[in-house]
Amino acid sequence: MNAQIDHNLEEIRRFRPSPEFAAQSVAQESLYTDAADDRLGFWADRARELHWHKPFTKTLDWTNPPFATWFEDGELNVAYNCLDRHVLAGHGDRIAIHWEGEPGDSRDISYAELTAEVKRAANLLTSLGIEAGDRVAIYLPMIPEAVVAMLAIARIGAVHSVVFGGFSPDSLHSRILDAEAKLVITADGGYRKGRAFGLKDTVDAALGKGAPSVAHVLVVKRTGNDVAWEDGRDLWWGDEIAQVDADHEAKAFPAEQPLFILYTSGTTGKPKGILHTSGGYLTQAAFTHRNVFDLHPESDVYWCTADVGWITGHSYVVYGPLANGATQVLYEGTPDTPHPGRWWEIIEKYKVSILYTAPTAIRSFMKVGRQIPQKYNLRSLRVLGSVGEPINPEAWIWYRHVIGGGSIPVVDTWWQTETGGIMISALPGITDLKPGSAQIPIPGISLDIVTDEGESVSGTDGGLLVITEPWPAMLRGIWGDPERFKETYWEKFGDKYFAGDGARRDEDGDIWLLGRVDDVMNVSGHRLSTAEIESSLVAHDMTAEAAVVGAADETTGQAVVAFVILKERQTVSMTNEEASEQLRAHVARQIGAIARPRQVFIVNELPKTRSGKIMRRLLRDLAEGREIGDTTTLADTAVMQSITDQVR
Ligand code: PRX
């Protein structure tokens, strides 16, 4: 266990909800008792808060585990639930999105306007031959068209696969191929850190590697930079959308209609296409969004800072908030452009009342200092949320005091791409908050902490986090690979979902997450696979062997640290520093900038067991500057000394 977590475990502060907050709380204690009395009935009631074209009569079918269906015989339209429903209820004038571009341009879009745009986009997709069940890849910056595209795809029963705009041509290419996307929606570029970056050129490079399924590329004009054009294949979004009908009726689709695929890193080199469907997913996204953030849609302004390229952007930028008729901020750029107070300026401008962000962002603001946020009026804030990695108590307290003014709730939410929605979190207004702990399962979620053999741990022992009952927003599988779905999550414990995280309960029964127990790293709240980065390093001409570890990092949680053995001839032609720099750039090019190693150490050997397995644990000790642990199982116990000499 690392020092930071040890520190977490000593945390004893508690913060009771204020009586004023509790009095207006959306969530009520009865949620817990209702869910405990009749878990399936509880979820069926939550589902009935959505609009069903055809009501369901069955709640859960778990007769063929691990393949679940929820609300199977019901029919709904996800986009209708996020749009038309609110307009018909008289909220058409309510702002759905306050969009803020990085250069300072902005747009306010009402529910009526968003609905109209999505209707046109749905007609456009249909005119391009996209039908229910077809896959469409989205590679866009954080602009309103990203939300419009997702909802238009959902509206016609097609399946989106959003690829984060920071991924490389190779990463985009493999995702397009795996999903056999028929269409790619992109932009000429986007703004980041004060500069326009290209996106269409990345799509061109990806498709240049061969993608027979793709018939068209729709391009949104954002930055106005020059783009290459393939007549017949490439179409301007703006030109095309102007030509289609404005009217579009949302048809009903089965509750289990696939809604999206989202790729995430696992323990092997190949990212997994996590598949989510419609009715259960939307039920849990909407319920958790309303209750975890205490959403009052008529008065709150909500802001989740995640990119739509990640699951947080799917569930808590697009589907949860829009299903709830929330008003939200969507921001294109980076937190420090053009000045370090940009986020706080946005909160002041739009009077944001609910902020949902990641510990890594909070820690980088802490580093810059409280004098920056203190220049702005942040008194509109009333709920703060955290996601993506454990939040250390210091960051929690800073968030509550410096950003929240000292008295508002901070909720730490644990979940995953696979879970689709929040699984563990306090409910503000009900729960006594404890900095650093994600606390308790949300109502209707059953989980446990077990030993390697699957027995519940006793008392406060650490163990593995498992989910013991199916939940509405659970992944329905890995796209095209049912075997991998079973192996990855279900084989270890049979009927329990293995999350891949370590956890423990404290004396009060509150849950503390202890980080991943597999070869998945968490860098700035983003999941990266050691195997994927290792295979990228080994794919470089000069690499003989590579080992990658996630080392604790003060700001990003973990950082990628690589140990590389060069091929013989390389060592004469360049210095280790040059080789290391080239390899870092190579990984960024191959996978994306988020995967660029913090350090690449050039070494002569790697620590291996007699059976040839690399002992990453020892490399992690070294990367974190700790004393090297037990080396007795190494084939050659002198190896660690020689690596240490080379690295330090
Ligand atoms: O290790 C856990 C960590 O992030 C992993 C899931 O990553 P991803 O699928 O990319 O989704 C991130 C956003 C939901 C988990 O297995 N994680 C996420 N939230 C927390 C967390 N670890 C501790 N505390 C959290 N609140």
Image (cartoon, helix red, strand yellow):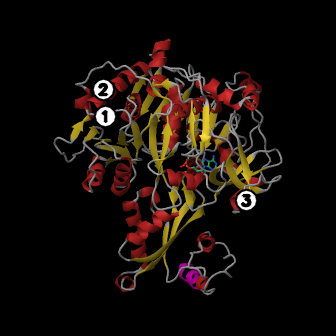
Q: Which residues are magenta?
A: 642-648
Residue extending furthest toward the front:
63
The mark found on residue 123 in the picture is: 2
Query: Is 381 or 422 nearer to us in this picture?
Result: 422
Residue extending furthest toward the left:
231
Give the secondary structure at mark 1.
loop
Tags 3 and 2 in contact by the CB under 8 Å rule?
no
Q: Earlier in the sequence, mark 1 or mark 3?
A: 1
Q: Earlier in the sequence, mark 1 or mark 2?
A: 2
Q: Tell us which disc is closer to us: 3 or 2.
A: 3
Is residue 321 shown left or right of residue 201?
A: right
Query: Is 444 or 133 nearer to us in this picture?
Result: 133
List the residue tagged with mark 3: 453
List the residue tagged with mark 1: 130
The quadrant holding residue 337 is: top left
Q: Position of residue 169 (x, y in %)?
A: 33, 55
Q: Is residue 367 visible?
A: no
Distance of label 3 from label 2 (alpha carbons): 53 Å
Crowding at mark 3 (Cα within 10 Å: few <14, some 14-19, many 20+): few
| Above or below, comparing residue 282 to residue 65 in the picture | above
| Above or below, comparing residue 426 to residue 211 in the picture | above
Q: Amino acid at mark 1?
A: Ile
